[in-house]
Amino acid sequence: MTQTTRLGVNDLKTQITLEKVFGIRIGLHYSWFLIALLIVLSLSRDFRASHPQWGSSLILTLAISTAVLFFVSLLLHELSHSLVARTRGLPVREITLFALGGVSQIEGEADSAKTEFWMALVGPLTSVLIGSLALERLRSLVGGTLSPLTTVLAWLGYINLGLAAFNMVPGYPLDGGRILRAIIWWKTGVLDRATRTAAKVGQAVGAAFTTTGVVEYFGGGLGGMWIAFIGWFFLQVAGVSYIEVGLRRRCKASASAM
Ligand SMILES: [Zn+2]
């Protein structure tokens, strides 16, 4: 996910700064701790169910290592967005990990559809690369019984491919939404129109997620609450970017009327 300062919410401030990588500040939002805990708990449960012979400390160590590797993968995904942005002359404020993933906070707006396209596409491409490398390594190891290493590799491989596929959904603020925006921008030459369309699709995706989540929750699936929350977040961000295009247009209109 990428976030430019003119588009969308900007209140996602880093609360705990970790490190600077390539001069880019990496930080955690408080909500990240919630998702980190949930991931470790759910991985421990899955590992225990699939490998009842493993001891508790091995399961906990594996769950924590897998979660750390997952967040490293997520950071590499965000870092790829940020590095492309920077090579195209857009300063990167910071990368923040939060409850729903990662955000690259990029100052300003891409100056061309091509920049926007590559800046968005590089994230899912990075996730595909990490996922494929993990699965390739897994294939070279599989032969006997499933070991702790092959279990971690399988999980990392599939989660990264899943991350890439999910981010390619063509609704803003997902990468797919920005790719759609870049393509419409390139075809029509009108950025505002492209943003509106990507935001509208984003709102539709958000509404679909929220509805599915609520239906699943009332059907007894606790995970539904999470899906509904993600949907609600998309609705907010897509809604804000839609409104901001309107505000910019109104500002321009009033300026020219003076
Ligand atoms: Zn992304």
Image: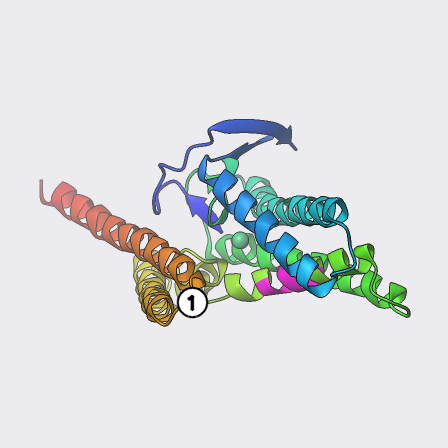
Taking the magenta stretch, the answer to whether it contains residue 161 is yes
Tag 1: Cα neighbours inside 10 Å, few (<14), some, or many (≥20)? few
Residue at the spot of label 1? 221
Which of the pair 36/172 is nearer the observer? 36
Q: Is residue 217 above or below residue 39?
A: below
- Give residue 126's position: percent from left, percent from top: 65, 55
Which of the pair 173/147 is nearer the observer? 147
Location of the C terminus (image quadrant): top left
- Give residue 132's position: percent from left, percent from top: 74, 63
Residue name at image x 36 percent, y 70 percent: 212
Q: Main secondary structure of the magenta part?
A: helix
Instruction: Please give left or right for residue 149 compared with residue 69 in the image.
Output: right
Residue name at image x 41 percent, y 55 percent: 173
Visible in this render: residue 97? Answer: no
Which of the pair 184/101 is nearer the observer? 101
Which of the pair 136/118 is nearer the observer? 136
Q: Quadrant of residue 165?
A: bottom right
Taking the magenta stretch, the answer to whether it contains residue 65 is no
- Give residue 61's position: percent from left, percent from top: 73, 44
Q: Is residue 157 above or below residue 72?
A: below
Q: Amino acid at mark 1?
A: Gly
- Which segment did they paint magenta? 157-162
- Give residue 1's position: percent from left, percent from top: 49, 51
Q: Is residue 136 above or below residue 123?
A: below
Mark 1, ligand 1, within 8 Å: the answer is no
Instruction: Please give left or right for residue 134 compared with residue 119 in the image.
Output: right
Instruction: Please give left or right for residue 90 compared with residue 134 in the image.
Output: left
Mark 1: secondary structure: loop
Q: Quadrant of residue 207?
A: bottom left
